[in-house]
């Protein structure tokens, strides 16, 4: 249990500014980090809580290509969206910065130049894949092909999103450039490599000897890299046109590798925070060895996919620079699944934070509670909408909300809404009051060991104990049989209710605030609950009872389940390729007999209408010259129903029928897809039924 004051820099992994935040992100890093930072502040520690958007790297340029815009427009849009989502969700960052600002660029380039000046880079000429049509080198994410493990046809050069296997571009079957569809060629290029093997012994001591208390999953990944594989040089530069330019005369067209650049964002964000405070040098005591002390701790919250970068590459960079402290702990969570399936942004299989906050206004604390109760701390865990409903109805409403409501109702009914003078407390009263400090100590120790699920459970058990106490004491009966006992019962209950506020605040800040308003007890710290947790003075007025939580009905939850299912069905059923989508140069050869089996004809669209609960799909009635039939086509984003009625189109008629959104689709309209993803009809000046030869 933290008693003496320490200094903490708490960081949460910088989210890529290429899309919104979903619940997997929250469970991986941001919610645990916020709980930890709030707890530290409430125990009188010196804390700065740091985050910001990571705005460089291939992910940004790919998103810009998808949305037919510029990388700068992408990062500006998503930085604003992500920042606002975090604020609305009560993530209490002291600063939320971005890696595209001038301070970050300057600092990252200074780091690079120091390594270069000190001779700590190796200049190595290598062969890398090059797009002969786009005339540029390809980062791993710009190479797509078939996964050799699961045969998924849209695997990236660094990872298959279908099966999760880490890949090299040369592992892919039929690799193609995601820029042009061309087959990549190997071409020589020079880069600056960090010889990680030079830091092998120092990293082994730092991780395996000095920090055996780190989480098992973190130590396991690090041990695999260090012991099983051994460290090797890793390029700290890339051939890209988006990123921080390498500050050397002979490095035109090269930028800093995102994992050299991004972790330094924690440092530059702290510098930004210090400048905003009007104390521009105060950041140094959180980061620099000469200004920090032995009680200065850097804690980096991440998801398991970032373990290697934060535990090996980032510390190696800090070791090489020489002036900075190293992470004291890197608590990494596993993955959160959704309804039994891996969260996938490309398949839209996710619960997006900003959408949740719109659908459930004022209920951010319920999501915080449900996620904390299911955090994937030691293994992958699963979020379901039914569990979310159950957590709200059976725990928050029935236990916590019920306790606060009962004690306030009884106080207004039997004590005129005033905290009573207790008189002599019985043994059971003193025992309940003592339980507050016991709970604070146990839950605090769990938080300090990054066991947030356990900590929340301990605090909720105190609410359960409060409910049992009221049920056992039965003040509604004793008002008739032993009225002198009522003041002590309600006094004890109210003190417990008031103490729940600071204990819940790291997990559910809005709820803690509501309890404070309800009981009028003012804001108290976690530290206060350890010592003399009797916050209410006799005679103090209690506000009229107001429900903390409302039940969430089945139909509301079913709407969310249906919406999730519809989004998935829409992407799977749509004729459009799953994003990211890129033109391909050519497909495998087929025989003339194969071609003869294809029945492609001219048809005319007779009617068109949008399919309910779908953003992409249209139901079309067409005249094929042979019959009238129904097609489902994923073109609603590009064409309105009204503008295509009467249009002559080219249709593949003998495609096997399939049911889409409950409608049997008998064929497929052929479309031409441009490089920017736009769709155009393939047309023919002929009568319906005319065959395409």
Image (cartoon, rainbow, N blue to C red):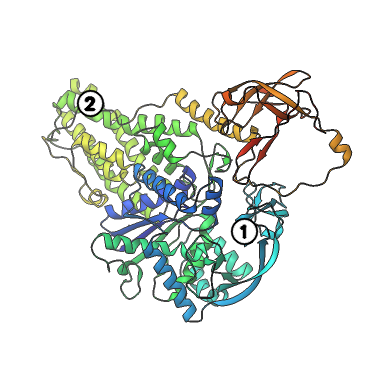
Disc on res. 140: 1
Q: Can residue 662 be seen in this view?
A: no
Q: In this view, does 283 lie above or below 83?
A: below
Residue at (53, 77) in percent of width and height: 121
Task: For the N terminus, give its image quadrant.
Answer: bottom left
Q: Where is residue 176 in the image (x, y as percent from the top left)?
A: 69, 54
In the rendered view, does 382 fall on the left or right side of 434?
A: right
Q: In this view, does 322 lie above or below 411?
A: below
Residue at (67, 39) in percent of width and height: 672
Q: Where is residue 668 in the image (x, y as percent from the top left)?
A: 71, 30
Q: Nearer the viewer, residue 431 or 314?
A: 314
Disc on res. 660: none
| Nearer mark to the viewer, of 1 and 2 | 1
- Tell which residue pokes out farthest to the left in this image: 539
Disc on res. 409: 2
Q: Which of 151 and 582 is in front in this view?
A: 582
């Amino acid at each position: 249990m933290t008693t003496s004051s320490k200094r903490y820099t708490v960081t949460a992994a910088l989210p890529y500014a290429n899309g919104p935040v979903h619940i997997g992100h929250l469970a991986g890093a941001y919610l645990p980090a916020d709980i930890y930072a709030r707890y530290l502040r409430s125990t009188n520690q010196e804390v700065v809580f740091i985050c910001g958007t990571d705005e460089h790297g291939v992910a940004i340029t790919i998103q810009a290509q998808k949305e037919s815009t510029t990388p700068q427009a992408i990062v500006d849009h998503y930085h604003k969206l992500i920042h606002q989502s975090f604020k609305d969700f009560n993530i209490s960052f002291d600063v939320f910065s971005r890696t595209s600002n001038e301070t970050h660029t300057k600092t990252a380039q200074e780091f690079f130049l120091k390594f270069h000046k000190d001779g700590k880079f190796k200049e190595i000429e290598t062969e890398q894949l090059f797009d002969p049509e786009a005339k540029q080198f390809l980062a791993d994410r710009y190479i797509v092909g078939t996964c050799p493990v699961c045969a998924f046809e849209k695997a990236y050069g660094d990872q298959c999103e279908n099966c999760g296997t880490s890949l090299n571009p040369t592992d892919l079957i039929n690799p193609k450039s995601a820029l042009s569809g061309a087959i990549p060629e190997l071409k020589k290029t020079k880069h600056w490599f960090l010889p990680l093997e030079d830091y092998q012994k120092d990293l082994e001591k730092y991780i395996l000897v000095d920090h055996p208390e780190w989480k098992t999953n973190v130590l396991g990944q690090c041990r695999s890299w260090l012991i099983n594989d051994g460290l090797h040089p890793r390029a700290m530069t890339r051939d890209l046109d988006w990123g921080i330019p390498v500050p050397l005369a002979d490095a035109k067209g090269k930028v800093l590798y995102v994992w050299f650049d991004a972790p330094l964002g924690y440092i530059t964000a702290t510098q930004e925070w210090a400048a905003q405070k009007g104390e521009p040098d105060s950041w140094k005591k959180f980061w620099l060895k000469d200004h920090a002390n032995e009680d200065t701790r850097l804690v980096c919250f991440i998801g398991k996919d970032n373990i290697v970068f934060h535990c090996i590459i980032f510390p190696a960079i800090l070791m090489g620079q020489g002036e900075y402290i190293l992470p004291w702990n890197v608590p990494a969570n596993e993955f959160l699944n959704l309804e039994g399936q891996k969260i996938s942004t490309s398949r839209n299989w996710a619960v997006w934070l900003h959408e949740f906050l719109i659908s459930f206004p004022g209920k951010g604390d319920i999501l915080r509670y449900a996620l904390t109760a299911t955090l994937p701390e030691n293994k992958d865990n699963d979020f379901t909408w039914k569990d979310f409903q159950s957590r709200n109805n059976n725990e928050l409403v029935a236990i916590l909300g019920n306790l606060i409501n009962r004690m306030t109702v009884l106080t207004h009914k039997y004590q005129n809404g005033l905290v009573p003078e207790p008189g002599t407390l019985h043994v059971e009263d003193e025992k309940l009051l003592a339980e507050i400090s016991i709970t604070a100590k146990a839950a605090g120790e769990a938080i300090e060991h990054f066991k947030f699920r356990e900590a929340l459970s301990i605090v909720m058990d105190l609410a359960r104990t409060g409910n049992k106490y009221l049920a056992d004491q039965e003040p509604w009966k004793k008002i008739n049989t032993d009225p002198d006992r009522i003041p002590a019962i309600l006094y004890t209950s109210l003190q417990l209710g008031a103490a729940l506020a600071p204990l819940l605040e790291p997990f559910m800040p809005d709820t803690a605030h509501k309890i404070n308003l309800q009981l009028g007890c003012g804001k108290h710290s976690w530290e206060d609950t350890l010592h003399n947790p009797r916050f209410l003075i006799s005679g103090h007025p209690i506000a009229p009872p107001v429900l903390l939580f409302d039940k969430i009905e089945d139909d509301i939850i079913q709407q969310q389940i249906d919406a999730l299912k519809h989004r998935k069905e829409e992407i799977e059923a749509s004729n459009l390729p799953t994003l990211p989508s890129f033109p391909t140069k050519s497909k495998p050869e087929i025989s003339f007999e194969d071609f003869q089996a294809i029945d492609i004809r001219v048809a005319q669209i007779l009617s068109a209408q949008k399919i309910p609960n779908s953003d992409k799909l249209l139901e079309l009635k067409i005249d094929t010259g042979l019959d009238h039939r129904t097609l489902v086509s994923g073109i609603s984003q590009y064409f309105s129903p009204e503008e295509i009625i009467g249009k002559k189109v080219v249709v593949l008629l003998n495609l096997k029928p399939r049911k889409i959104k409950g409608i049997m689709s008998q064929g497929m309209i052929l479309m031409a897809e441009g490089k920017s993803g736009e769709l155009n009809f393939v047309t023919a000046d002929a009568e319906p039924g005319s065959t395409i030869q």
